[in-house]
Amino acid sequence: MKLHSTVLFPGVLFSLLVLPLSAQTARKNTPTDSQILGQVQKTFHDDHAFAGSSIMPSVNHGVVTLTGNVRSEAEKTLASSELSNVDGVKTVLNNLSIVDHTFHPPAAPAVAPGPTGPKVVTLPQGSAIPIRLTDEISTKEAKAGDAFHAIAATNITFGGYTLARAGTPVTGRIVEAKPAGRLSGSAELTIELVSMKLSSPNGQAPEEVAILTQQLSSKGAGRGPNTAAKAGGGAAVGAIVGGLAGGGTGASIGAASGGALGLGTNFLTHGKEIDLKSEQLLQFRTAAPLDVTISLVNGHQVLPSASNGPAFQSPSAAVFPQAPSVPHNP
């Protein structure tokens, strides 16, 4: 019995000595939180995939928590997978935020589109309508009720809109035409405008639009006074007359008072008849408001078709003082 006790004692003693040594070795091989943190930081620093990101790790009993910003979902997933090879990491709490660092220019402010479709613009009474004759009018042949033709001498505008472009066809009417007589002598002429051929806002063919203008009148030379004039219907309108023989700028005749045509001897044949040549300039004024329909796209006017007629060259300011476009001028 004594010998048996002696044999067992060394084995028990060996066991008591080996177990504490193994536990101590295990504790020495497990990295501390500080060591784990150092390895985690080195991993992110060495991997260029994380360049430009701001990742802030922390470690508590082997549990790594990640906070900060990365640029994509893929980069966030990679951060967790990279730490799986770091010794001592038990788990990873990934609280990284995804921030898009791509430059995005500021969006342009939204602009509400303007109206699209037809719009009625009213040209007020008394607005100027300058024309250039395309027919000759002579009291020797003209009769009351006859039509004559002309074109708009300039653009006619109002409120920022172009209602008719230069060259727009215009139709007039002879109200009174009296040839010079041997006894009474004086020739008389009264004219007015009755319509304009305006472009349709829906793209269809131009249509005749009725207009009402104040009349222009004149009395030629006779045995009595040489320059008698009257305003038809009592309207007081002025007139601008210029000679454009062959398309060139003619001499200044000057505007007459009231509604007279203001004709001088340059426009009288045989010293008596009133003779208005083709390409002569006259200015009428509207006797009533004129409604014109225009077309808008997003608030901007679609301009009416341009005339195919000859370009108009404005005479001197004394003859034709208006600008290329004639706005309302009561």
Image (cartoon, rainbow, N blue to C red):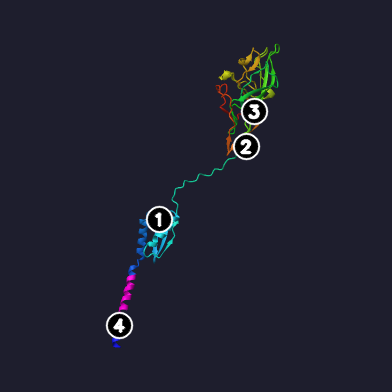
Q: Which residue is mark 1?
A: 54
Q: Which residues are magenta?
A: 6-26
Q: Quadrant of residue 154?
A: top right
Q: Is residue 329 magenta?
A: no
How crowded is the residue under tag 1: few (<14 C-alpha within 10 Å), some, or many (20+)? some
How crowded is the residue under tag 4: few (<14 C-alpha within 10 Å), some, or many (20+)? few
Q: Nearer the viewer, mark 1 or mark 4?
A: 4
Residue 9 position, x and y percent, is: 30, 82
Residue 30 position, x and y percent, is: 35, 67
Q: Which residue is mark 2?
A: 118
Q: Nearer the viewer, mark 2 or mark 4?
A: 4
Q: Main secondary structure of the magenta part?
A: helix
Q: Amino acid at mark 1?
A: Ser
Q: Which residue is mark 3?
A: 196
| In contact (CB < 8 Å): disc 1 and disc 2 | no
| In contact (CB < 8 Å): disc 3 and disc 2 | no
Mark 1 or 4, nearer chain start: 4
Q: Amino acid at mark 3?
A: Met
Mark 3 or 2, nearer chain start: 2
Q: In screen coordinates, is 195 left or right of 50?
A: right
Residue 214 position, x and y percent, is: 66, 25
